[in-house]
Image (cartoon, coloured by chain):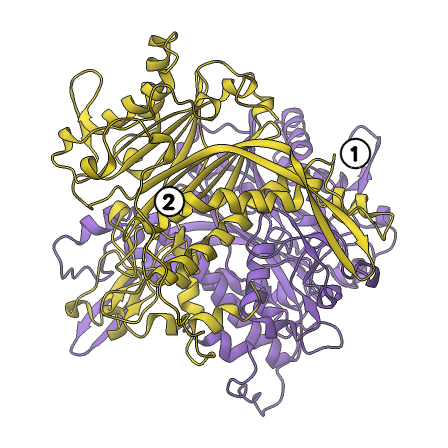
Chain colours: A yellow, B purple
């Protein structure tokens, strides 16, 4: 991304956009469920056009199929909100090859060694909106972007400390000292690779959607195990938590118009033309009406964490940039999340006002130092889309996890069963047979047992 | 602040700046020490032009003078870094009067009741740079700005919940419901008032400095007690901590080019013209040299928390927007803080590049619910400028505080003595007689005993 990019892309007066390729459109992204669900019974097309909540099937991998670290997975489609399940999932082994640099006159070429050099694992959830296409593209693409980004820095990752120069040809003897002083560690390269991979994937999705004439966006929640650490990268409103016997640790934060209010209001302050005179960037406790004109009402602007009062002017009666509360909060009346992938063409209904300038594709990355934990067999990371967290609190999920794993010590498929049980608990049937809350959204859950990392399918 | 303000003020191509007033310049801001130091012995002009560290006098209020809540205060001037002590302090009672609204055809007027309505207390430290003028103006002005801001919302502050309409004339019966849903509490009005007061004070300082032809800026750390809560507002690198028998709680964060790297880099990404082609916004482990050209080196940009590698181009050799580490970190090679008041005219040496666009005058506000604490006599808040924290850690300060207060239970001036003792500990003489670190900076300290709030000088 170069300076000036934002203005050229989003603001009036910049150069004209590049013409679309003149050739025929590429074919639309085909709908499918995650590959690891193959052979798990009901076919997607038959089951996905679903009916009443209690008749919707919970799907999970076939019994013979093992996911990385023996992780469990389950999903359920929403109650007729959309024709397709807009959630997507992906997981697998991440094989990072080493790049070797050769030196030639005036050029630098690199050879990728054929054999893999560093192995990790990858689990990802994507919650789509405005169609399934973006989530499918993300599930097909993000791991490749990440592998490419990691391969570009793997030489630094395996060093005790990342070298100032990737090729190792230091020009300054105190380089290690500077790297040390800035506190740059190998894990910072993985964080950087995740940040760059999300951006790269967003670009790919933008090009693919444009080429196929499709639309849509998705959130992305990714867990990556590498060199004894678990990296959780999140852009959107999915959530990952660590559940242990005596601990619940939240591994991600949600990015919504409410949690990112100041960033979004500030952008509208800097570029008022993004609102095209149709919205007000100010926040009020409710949408104002004509009767409020001239009165002093509660408000806050981009620089404020607190609230103040202002005298209502006519422009304050416009529709608010961020409107509604909690799950109902919407950006420009349109979108419930403020980070994610895709949405390159999304506009406010019946206007030319773009959503994309307000959206970030950058994830927040949390690092869990698994090697530093004294692991027990019941220690798991639960990753799920917002459909789960809308009806179950972290504490409720932890309670369900602990009691299920205690009661099912011997079942070899217990993490998959646990994922299914969690989904059942979003459908109004809790384990005690009493009434629980019902999620009408798509719900997808990974349960990753940390103890398994030392066994067959894990390690590095 | 209106939209477009930033561009009009800082970017080329906007309208011309308003001409300076043609009249004679107002007289320069006179140098003085805080009023509450009067009668404390040595006169400022005689003592401030100081010599070796161990000959610098520690100053504190005269024995007969009681500060709000019997708070202690002490200060020391720097070791010949500047002619004057650039730190300033202020404290006092905050008397907030109630505004009453009258209703008239097509106009709204307000009557300020003569008697005070709500009483609070105020302690503030300002650490100046580039001359003492901004800190003196801030010490003279900020409390008035705050009182004005609080008086504008006091009606809402004393309500169980702030009303949607300040004058109480709701136009919508569900207004309380919306306020409740947004979680807006009386303390949010105080936070908003502090945020607005800092901005207002910054504007006043800008006008006064321009009128008197002076320059400079300052940090601001403010503690305000109101309705059983202590609000700590900070813009800069001073710090406040709560010290109790079993607890150290940090009540402020520092704002420096390092801690605000992403905000500062992002502004340079959005407005590259602010760097006038002289600086690079990218961060590297060290300043790059010609030998680095074409190599791949560690870097990060505004969107990254992690690090990555990039191939060095010629533009990467420019001086970095943020350079140096820790105490040496500088914004545009010039300033060690990224928030504060003043600096309206500050430019990079020998260029026309302005610092002000990168500086925020908005404080971060922390709320300590004092009424919810089971207070003991030894519970204190320690506020100090960076000169203290550069040489003493939070833990060291807490240890000194606890042992001093335990050993001096009966001394009526013990909080003032404690403030002096803390300063002595920045001068290389620790209490045990062993060598400690030496601060060559100005140092100012308030010690606020929370237990005193229920006694004579406190309450509301």
Q: Residue furthest front?
A: A24
Name the subunit of mark 2: B
Does the CB distance between marks 2 and 1 fall below 8 Å?
A: no
Percent from the top left, x then y, of residue B322? 68, 59
Percent from the top left, x then y, of residue A20? 40, 71
Sequence-first tag of 2 and 1: 2
- Closer-to-camera residue (A390/A37): A37
Percent from the top left, x then y, of residue A26? 37, 60
Q: Quadrant of residue A459?
A: top right
- Closer-to-camera residue (A397/B242): A397
Q: Secondary structure at mark 1?
A: loop
**Quarter of the image where the C terminus of chain B is located:** top left
**Quarter of the image where the N terminus of chain B is located:** bottom left
A357 shown above or below A155? below
Q: Quadrant of residue B372?
A: top left
A117 shown above or below B151? above
Percent from the top left, x then y, of residue A6? 49, 68
Q: Secondary structure at mark 2?
A: loop
Left or right: residue B443 versus residue B292 is: left
- Closer-to-camera residue (A41/B108): A41
Residue under label 1: B430
Answer yes or no: is residue B76 visible. Answer: no
Q: Residue at x 29, y 61 (%)?
A: A332
Name the subunit of mark 1: B
Residue under label 2: B227
User: What is the spatial separation of the Cα atoms under label 2 and label 1, in whole angstroms?
Assistant: 38 Å
């Amino acid at each position: 991304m170069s300076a000036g990019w934002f203005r050229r892309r989003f603001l009036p007066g910049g150069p004209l956009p590049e013409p679309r390729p003149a050739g025929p459109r590429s074919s639309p992204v085909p709908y499918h469920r995650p590959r690891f669900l193959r052979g798990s019974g009901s076919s997607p097309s038959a089951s996905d056009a679903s009916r009443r909540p209690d008749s919707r099937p919970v799907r999970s991998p076939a019994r013979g199929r093992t996911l990385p670290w023996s992780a469990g997975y389950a999903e359920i489609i929403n109650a007729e909100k959309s024709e397709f399940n807009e959630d997507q999932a992906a997981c697998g082994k991440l094989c990072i090859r080493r790049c070797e640099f050769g030196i030639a006159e005036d050029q630098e070429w690199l050879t990728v060694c054929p054999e893999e050099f560093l192995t990790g694992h990858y689990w990802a959830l994507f919650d789509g909106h405005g169609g399934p296409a973006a989530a499918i593209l993300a599930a097909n693409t993000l791991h490749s972007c990440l592998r490419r980004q990691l391969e570009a820095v793997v030489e630094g990752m395996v060093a005790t400390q990342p070298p100032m120069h990737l090729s190792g040809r230091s020009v300054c003897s105190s380089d290690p000292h500077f790297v040390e002083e800035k506190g740059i560690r190998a894990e910072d390269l993985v964080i950087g690779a995740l940040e760059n991979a999300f951006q790269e994937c967003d670009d790919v999705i933008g090009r693919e959607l444009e080429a196929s004439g499709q639309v849509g966006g998705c959130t992305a929640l990714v867990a990556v195990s590498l060199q004894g650490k678990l990296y959780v990268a999140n852009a959107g409103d999915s959530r990952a938590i660590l559940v242990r016997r005596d601990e619940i640790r939240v591994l991600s934060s949600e990015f919504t118009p409410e949690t990112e209010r100041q960033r979004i209001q500030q952008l509208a302050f800097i570029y008022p033309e993004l609102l095209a005179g149709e919205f007000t960037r100010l926040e009020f406790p409710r949408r104002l009406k004509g009767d409020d004109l001239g009165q002093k009402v509660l408000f806050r602007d981009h620089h404020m964490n607190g609230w103040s009062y202002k005298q209502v002017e006519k422009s304050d009666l416009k529709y608010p940039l961020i409107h509604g509360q909690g799950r109902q909060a919407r950006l420009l009346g349109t979108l419930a999340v403020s980070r994610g992938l895709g949405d390159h063409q999304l506009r406010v209904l019946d206007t030319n006002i773009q959503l994309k300038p307000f959206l970030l594709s950058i994830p927040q990355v949390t690092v869990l130092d698994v090697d530093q934990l004294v692991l027990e067999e019941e220690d798991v990371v639960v990753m799920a889309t917002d459909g789960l967290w809308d009806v179950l609190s972290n504490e409720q999920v932890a309670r369900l996890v602990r009691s299920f794993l205690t009661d099912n010590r011997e079942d070899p498929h217990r993490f998959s069963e646990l994922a299914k049980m969690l989904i059942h608990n979003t459908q109004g049937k809790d384990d005690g047979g009493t009434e629980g809350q019902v999620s009408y959204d798509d719900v997808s859950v990974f349960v990753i047992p940390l103890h398994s990392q030392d066994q067959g399918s894990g390690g590095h």
